[in-house]
Amino acid sequence: MANIAKKVSWSGRGDDRGERTPLLNGDEEVKYNRQLSGGGIFHIGRLSTVDLEEEITPEEDIVRSRPKEIPHNEKLLSLKFESLDYDNSENQLFLEEERRMSHMGFRCLEIRRWVICGLIGFLTGLIACMIDIAVEKLAGYKYFAVKLNIEKYTELGGLSISLILWAVLNSAFVMFGAIAVAFVEPIAAGSGIPQIKCFLNGVKIPRVVRLKTLVIKVFGVICSVAGGLAVGKEGPMIHSGAVVAAGVSQGRSTSLKKDFKIFEYFRRDTEKRDFVSAGAAAGVSAAFGAPVGGVLFSLEEGASFWNQMLTWRIFFASMVSTFTLNFFLSIYHGKPGELSSPGLINFGRFDSDSVQYNLYEIPLFIIMGALGGVLGALFNIINYWLTIFRIRYIHRPCLQVMEAMLVAAVTATVSFAMIYFSNDCQPLGQDNTEEYPLQLFCADGEYNSMATAFFNTPERSVRSLFHNPPGTYNPVTLGVFTLAYFFLAVWTYGLTVSAGVFIPSLLIGAAWGRLFGILLSFIASSQSIWADPGKYALIGAAAQLGGIVRMTLSLTVILVEATGNVTYGFPIMLVLMTAKIVGDYFIEGLYDIHIKLQSVPFLHSDAPPTSHWLTAREVMSSPVTCFNRVEKVGRIVDVLSNTSTIHNGFPVVAHTSENDEPGKICGLILRSQLIVLLKHKVFVERASSRLSQRKLQLKDFRDAYPRFPPIQSIHVSQDERECMMDLTEFMNPTPYTVPQETSLPRVFKLFRALGLRHLVVVDNENRVVGLVTRKDLARYHVGKDGLEELHLAQT
Amino acid sequence: MANIAKKVSWSGRGDDRGERTPLLNGDEEVKYNRQLSGGGIFHIGRLSTVDLEEEITPEEDIVRSRPKEIPHNEKLLSLKFESLDYDNSENQLFLEEERRMSHMGFRCLEIRRWVICGLIGFLTGLIACMIDIAVEKLAGYKYFAVKLNIEKYTELGGLSISLILWAVLNSAFVMFGAIAVAFVEPIAAGSGIPQIKCFLNGVKIPRVVRLKTLVIKVFGVICSVAGGLAVGKEGPMIHSGAVVAAGVSQGRSTSLKKDFKIFEYFRRDTEKRDFVSAGAAAGVSAAFGAPVGGVLFSLEEGASFWNQMLTWRIFFASMVSTFTLNFFLSIYHGKPGELSSPGLINFGRFDSDSVQYNLYEIPLFIIMGALGGVLGALFNIINYWLTIFRIRYIHRPCLQVMEAMLVAAVTATVSFAMIYFSNDCQPLGQDNTEEYPLQLFCADGEYNSMATAFFNTPERSVRSLFHNPPGTYNPVTLGVFTLAYFFLAVWTYGLTVSAGVFIPSLLIGAAWGRLFGILLSFIASSQSIWADPGKYALIGAAAQLGGIVRMTLSLTVILVEATGNVTYGFPIMLVLMTAKIVGDYFIEGLYDIHIKLQSVPFLHSDAPPTSHWLTAREVMSSPVTCFNRVEKVGRIVDVLSNTSTIHNGFPVVAHTSENDEPGKICGLILRSQLIVLLKHKVFVERASSRLSQRKLQLKDFRDAYPRFPPIQSIHVSQDERECMMDLTEFMNPTPYTVPQETSLPRVFKLFRALGLRHLVVVDNENRVVGLVTRKDLARYHVGKDGLEELHLAQT
């Protein structure tokens, strides 16, 4: 049956029953409880702690006995995800409002949109700046303390004390981060990119764009990066930007109990999506100093409809974001006005003269791309199994925190061991760029080269791999480092901490890329152009990252912008393309894997190619619960309260009785609209008495957005049940419809291009025969033997 | 009434009656002739000279008396433009074919698409390379000859002979180009960007993607650039790329009478559009060395639906294109493998160290942006009046050729006068980059600075303005040059020659930008960062170009890629944004002006904001000519032959009689499909006798695409008129429909997002009440006093 109900079980907020599973750790146990509607009392008064998404807390513990192992099957499509309304419900109220607005009014709206985008960019840039400074400070203290300790014990002996200090410091940082994430806001785990992809795709992920999520995310990412995990702070910026955008554009925060009474026009999913796109772009922009890349990221992942003004606004937000970051960092670094840090990660300057590549290097780049594809696929496969393991066995918050701490300690230990057993000493140059050169057992005036890679924040390590002069690293160091860091990074991604996978991927790739370059220069030592291992480090980094995330155009541009030089555009494109083709042969990209493991009904940009066999008749849900134009309140309440088949959209038909033939469609009304109508008791019988009262306005719907109360919270008396409700004014009178014979690709195109939530299927008499929703389309996908259908599951 | 007929008058090919008006010189006389269908005999056998668009030559001269002045009113919407079918007609034949195809089959298709994109990129790159070499050679000979002559007569006196030589050489080159364009293929005039915008938007511009157009375009652009006009060769590359794409993707050329029998699957508008996007992107990429900019250009101008794979393919074509150009130019320059010319225009290397900008320069950039907006608007306004003048008075090809020659001669004269009267002598440095330094009256070892700007191809002049060291030009020279070149460029754009406006715009902007920089350094001479006038030249160039064309994101990226350095991303964005906002206050962008002057029904990305007042009922055309499922051949022939109301799409209804109430919709059939059916005589009565014959296949439709014969060429006997035709198998059984109450923005969104050509409006019984086509939507636009409606005109 059509549309899915609000579910309360997933990452439910019951106190500490080990109930929470973060977004991307699926929870396949059937927690769905049909008795919920009978006995459940919902706290809708608790708006003070919630922000931008709805929250319903079931008081009773509906799942008391919890099995140790949670089975998981990724061939499922969860029914618990709602869709967002990316198609405006153009009912009479809406049209009246639009018609009242003058040309000037639309201009003002447009200006307001620009102001909001500017604000989004500014705030995102500020947050990036804050994260950067906090991480730098904390990591600085940590490395300083450990360095002193190591220096002390190198002479005395007993370096194991240094190791313990390091491991404890790391674990402590990570513990704070993991506790915040696991116990307070599990949705803040990971990079947030899969969640934002889903949001832009039209799937409602609970609490993903809340202020609280943002706070935890920022805190978490500072802790995990400072804690020395193999993670980056760039991915989370995208999520942060999106939250900022969702918050600013709505002009209110229920967490802070503050409604600024501005931007009320933008309180609907359509507008919010546009701003969230801008926020995500601003996040990318601040993370990599890549404003164009940010725009392309948003477009590639989200917006299906290209609108010139929207794109330009998104670009504006991106530009403001990188500029803000740059400006404040320049002040922080004591050189106000010198705009040299456009992003959190700075690849450093690739000078134009040294970065020429030659035609005969292109086959080499393609080989590196293929290698990156294979290594990326390996990364994804290992992480896939690890994630399934985590879903099954590590679903309690305390276990999750412990795992995170364990990884932190192991990371420190491995790093320490690497440094300890490495005997790669390099002379300390005059223009030494190492922040914390560890001398250890090296001679005076030399430093341990392995420490450059391990005893440092990953961003700095990437930069030194790109730019340190040839000969800085010996091949064995690089090889061992690649291997160790690869497995650390695989293990780390998916932990219950806020962290991104971009930087570790770049670091792994840069390491083996540089190794590749060094080996090449051994083979052909005469030609100086081969001798620049930094170039190969860059190509390797691109290959590895491309192999893992499989982004295409946007990633090319991000990398080009991050290097600050377009010369490498062509090689980077070739490498990313090869990596994607090779990687796709084995397994999907990392983000898609995690989205799939969550059974999210994600719609790709095209229907599966072989789906012309199917028509709307086969994919639609039927029969459909319809309402009459003038419907009895009792029936509406009953339908909304029925928890076995929870719908969110109802076709409104002319003259239908319960068991009769289907009626002719005359509109579509949403659950949320009905709820507001019931709450305001807009009954026909009251119309006369309501003459003195004000008429229901669009504002009432906007005020309730986006957290409409559940039906159980609305009290309807027995008398009122006999009243009638006239839906004419509130329903969307012109829903999109398709005939039953429409092929699936055609339905898909309509659905995706317009961002629909419900598509009514009618017969040739315009009678409602079915309803197509997101899950009806998302369940078809191309498997190994052609078209496959995913099973639908309540969880 | 709905859909517009094929018209024969516009840029008709009647022999030499002064009939031809090139695409963007409208022709407002009512040439439409209702008797056409009666007496006109159409030559449909002349396929040998036609390529990718249909061509119908009326033998009789339907417009014999021609007024001297052609009135023009831009508040018109022409009915003579057909739409393209960017929505697949999913009839039974199509579905059967798709269903027959295996998963492997779709893979092969996808690979073929990649191969085609690679070919498009390769050929576009080759063409760019050819143009570049030809222009360089020809211009080289010209300047060499003139230089020798000037040197000779500087001593002897009598420089007027040199002037005459220069003017004659220029005029001769331009004459060849103009004759080719004006007499052979008027559509090849101008840059072709407005035409490609229209094509991607879904408007069928006759002959725009033909091989012949490409040949004339390439020849024309070589002539006009070599002829020293104030034009660039970059804009035409976009058109050239699009033609290459349209040709390659269809796997045949009727000009060359060659059908390669490949890529037959792609013979429809939907697929062709995707390839043309790729071609346009490849063109941008080859022109500016800006592959990402090319992709963004295509997306900004054309594709409304973002599809990840498509975008990636477009990017591939772009990359191959710039790479091919780079590769072949490196061979030509004798340094194979040194990839240093990614585009036709090379901005030269902006070295990272010298290009830092400072925070306090940003207000200056914004001021320059505003200045660019004002100057751009001025350019557009003058050009607008000039274009109207040309439409009215200069519509004969011989006049057009003469005007072009006049402009060429004047350009030479002005240049010569400037050089002659300039006394700005500069020392000839060691590392002199001037190709043709003119000594003239300067001392030995010095050269005339004005000649650097005028006695050179515009590309070289731009580069020297960007990169020559401070002090190369004196302010007066720059001021005079700006002024002179501005008016030359305004006059030149719109001539009947193939030429682009990018380079002249950049050149004007670079000149006043450099002037701005020099003046600034006078004011604040102490700070060295102000002293780099090259930076201000770049910003000025961006401002001027932005002020004229008003492109946004794509132009930012194009400029960033052309400079090879992302440092200037933020200033360039600011400047372009300011220029657009300021310029839009006065007048639209240049391309939009020319599209509007042609009365093209162009659909922008959004409906006008204040159009919620209107519903489908008001905008639709009605009554609609419908057909029955099984229709009499005679009626079909009559309807198709009726020239007073020429439709291209017909709803198919169940059981309707001519004067009855409207029937229930059951499909939609296109004129082109009916023509093919009539041609193959697919009549019910012949079904029994056709048992031995093969069934009509999709291939038959594809073979006829895109030049379906006119109805008049199909002979239907009196007996056959009594036969019946069953349309069920060929009609699209699931056309998109909307109810009458749907608001205009909602109709617009559906229409634009899906690339529709016909949208059927139905009542609540699913009976056809109207049809919405492109012109019904395009005629509403926002004027000064709110929503305005354009008048529809047959011409």
Image: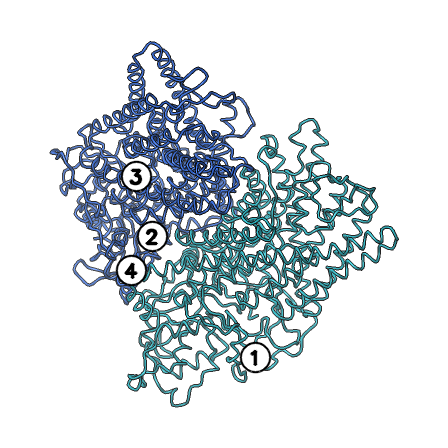
Chain colours: A cyan, B blue
* Residue B586 location (% of width, % of height): 29, 47
Is any part of residue A665 visible from this angle? no
Q: Distance between the residues labelled 1 and 2?
A: 48 Å
Q: How far apart are marks 1 and 4 (CA)?
A: 47 Å
Circle 2 sits in a helix, a strand or a loop, which is it?
Answer: loop
Q: Which residue is at the front of the view, B452 or B95?
A: B452
* Residue A260 location (% of width, % of height): 44, 70
First in sequence, mark 3 or 2: give its number. Answer: 3
The mark found on residue B756 in the picture is 2
Q: How far apart are marks 2 and 4 (CA)?
A: 28 Å
Residue that label 4 marks: A103
The mark found on residue B379 in the picture is 3
Q: Determine whether A605 is above or below B708 in the image.
A: below
Are labels 3 and 2 assigned to the same chain?
yes
* Residue A676 location (% of width, % of height): 40, 77
- Amino acid tagged 4: His
Chain identity of mark 4: A
- Amino acid tagged 3: Phe
Is any part of residue A623 visible from this angle? yes
Circle 3 sits in a helix, a strand or a loop, which is it?
Answer: helix
Q: Which of marks 2 and 4 is in front?
A: 4
Instruction: Report the side of A298 relative to B381 (left or right).
Output: right
Q: Determine whether A344 is above or below A646 in the image.
A: above
Q: Residue at x 44, y 50 (%)?
A: B98
Residue that label 1 marks: A58
